Amino acid sequence: MKQIFTVGHSNRSWSGFVSILLKNCITMVVDVRRFPGSRRYPHFNKANVIKLLPHENIEYIHIEKLGGRREKTDLAHNSNSHWQNKSFQAYANYMKTQSFKEGIDEILLVAKHNTIAIMCAEALPWRCHRRFISDYLTMLGLEVQDILNTKEPKHHEFTSFAQIIDGEIRY
């Protein structure tokens, strides 16, 4: 079974970030930030990441289709109402779109030949949309590991109240 990692850049230094990537043998960073920039930590702006990662023999790809901060959708029936957080509810609804599925297909394609780390800004995957991407990849039979710090990665745990119905996740 193919392993996929997730990581949040958070407030890490560039060297600290690269260190945890190399420790986990990451060969490609898949940026899933919808808006790939950081005013507070400019070394994580897309242009800088593109410029710096090759020096570490790590490739970079940005998949905006998997980015967070999704608008509430006007679904006739909201099947993801278990989430109290409206942003999480909006992303869970977005997971039903063709655009989301195309983003997942891009991840599956690059993961065939790379050890990837799906990256966004939030350090803790259960506090951001990486949780949803990880649930979806787990549903597809992939093993997802969350890189939290310099220790061993933590196995992604499928969201306890999630259900798989007709090939889709409902929360």
Image (tube, rainbow, N blue to C red):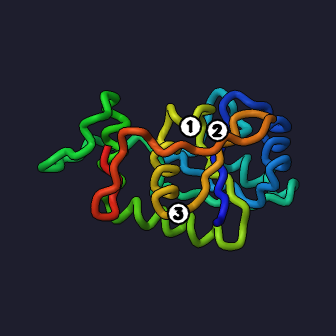
The CA distance from mark 2 to mark 1 is: 7 Å
* Amino acid at circle 1: Pro
Cα distance in 3D space between marks 3 and 1: 19 Å
Residue 44's place in the image compared with 32, above or below, is above
Give how far across and how far down residue 53 sits, in percent. Answer: 79, 53
Residue 49, compared with residue 154, is above or below; it is: below
Dots 2, 1 in contact, CB < 8 A = yes
- Mark 1 is surrounded, within 10 Å at the Cα level, by few (under 14), some (14 to 19) or many (20 or more) other residues, namely many
Q: Going 79% across and 58% down the picture, which residue do you hit?
A: 58
Q: What amino acid does circle 3 point to?
A: Gly
Tell me the quarter of the picture where residue 156 sits: top right
Q: Determine the secondary structure under disc 1.
A: helix
Residue position for label 3: 141
Using the numbered discs, state the Cα–Cα distance from disc 2 to disc 3 in whole angstroms. 23 Å
- Dot 3: element: loop
Asked if residue 77 is positioned above or below residue 86 in the image, the reply reads below
At 50% across and 36% down in the image, what residue appears?
Answer: 128
Q: Which quadrant does the N terminus fall into?
A: bottom right
Which residue is the site of mark 1?
Answer: 125
The single residue placed furthest to the left in the displayed view is 76
Residue 50 coordinates in the image, percent (x, y): 72, 54
Q: Amino acid at mark 2?
A: Gly
Q: Nearer the viewer, residue 168 or 43?
A: 168
Q: What numbered label is drawn on residue 8?
A: 2
First-in-chain label (2 vs 1)? 2
User: Quadrant of the image for the C terminus?
Assistant: top left
